[in-house]
Image (cartoon, rainbow, N blue to C red):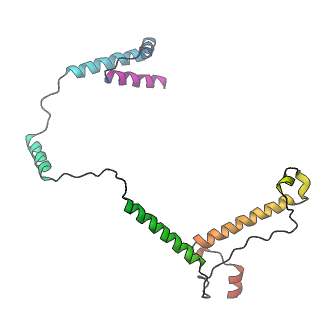
């Protein structure tokens, strides 16, 4: 891998008319592969610079004439660089975003008046919290030990976390899934049967 990088650097220095740096010259003296590549690259670069370009470019006069006529008759394509959007465009975008936000908030706060299940709103409530859960202030929290909450405290906390996750999934499903993909709830099944 190192040899490939050094070969690239030799070609780059010689093609750009820069002399090889001393450390690269030392590397060429140590390696015959690098020395051979350096000599071939110097020979190739010198040969290409010594050969004048041929006057015949290989383009026929008919092709050149057609190309020049096309360039003269075709209007120039104006390329437009990146410009900053106008303040009016930015203001209009912000106004549209604000209007959309207000409309979404307003439609979610309107209670449903019909009994159609597709338009009724569902109120999600947090899971009930035990009154037995201890309340702790900051001063007490500094002196707590693992056994201070009593048996089953970890299991209760896990149940609270699972209830929160289920509530979040119900919320996401009711708001973002099509109604035909939603699972039927127990209340809907009682109403149908």
Q: Is residue 53 left or right of residue 34?
A: left
When asked about the image quadrant of residue 13, the answer is: top left
Q: Is residue 174 above or below residue 86?
A: below
Residue at image position (63%, 79%) is: 121
Q: Is residue 56 left or right of residue 113?
A: left
Q: Is residue 38 left or right of residue 112?
A: left
Q: Position of residue 165 (x, y in %)?
A: 71, 64
Q: Magenta segment: does it hold 18? A: no
Look at the image and give the residue range highlighted in magenta.
1-14
Q: Is residue 185 above or below residue 40?
A: below
Q: Position of residue 65 (x, y in %)?
A: 9, 44
Q: Position of residue 162 (x, y in %)?
A: 75, 64
* Viewer-proximal residue among 6 and 131: 131
When asked about the image quadrant of residue 111, the answer is: bottom right
| Magenta segment main secondary structure | helix
Image quarter (top left, top right, bottom left or bottom right) of the C terminus: bottom right
* Viewer-proximal residue among 108 and 85: 85
Residue at image position (15%, 53%) is: 74
* Viewer-proximal residue among 14 and 141: 141
When asked about the image quadrant of residue 16, the answer is: top left
Q: Is residue 39 above or below residue 173?
A: above
* Viewer-proximal residue among 132 and 135: 135
- What is the tally of numbered marks visible in this picture? 0
Q: Is residue 115 above or below residue 41?
A: below
Q: Magenta segment: does it hold 13? A: yes
Q: Position of residue 152 (x, y in %)?
A: 88, 60
Residue at image position (76%, 70%) is: 127
């Amino acid at each position: 891998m190192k040899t490939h990088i050094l070969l690239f650097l030799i070609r780059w220095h010689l093609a750009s008319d820069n002399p090889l740096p001393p450390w690269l010259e030392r590397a060429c003296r140590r390696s015959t592969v690098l020395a051979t590549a350096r000599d071939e690259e110097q020979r190739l670069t010198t040969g290409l610079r010594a050969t004048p370009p041929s006057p015949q470019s290989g383009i026929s006069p008919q092709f050149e004439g057609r190309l020049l006529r096309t360039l003269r008759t075709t209007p120039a394509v104006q390329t437009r660089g990146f410009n900053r959007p106008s303040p009016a465009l930015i203001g209009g975008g912000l106004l549209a975003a604000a209007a959309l936000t207000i409309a979404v908030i307003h439609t979610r706060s309107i209670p449903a008046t019909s009994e159609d299940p597709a338009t009724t709103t569902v109120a999600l409530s947090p899971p009930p919290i035990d009154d037995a859960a201890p309340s702790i202030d900051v001063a007490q929290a500094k002196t707590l030990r693992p056994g201070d909450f009593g048996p089953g405290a970890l299991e209760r906390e896990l149940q609270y976390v699972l209830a929160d996750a289920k509530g979040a999934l119900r919320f996401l499903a009711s708001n973002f899934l099509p109604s035909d993909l939603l699972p039927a709830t127990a209340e809907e099944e009682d109403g149908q049967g």
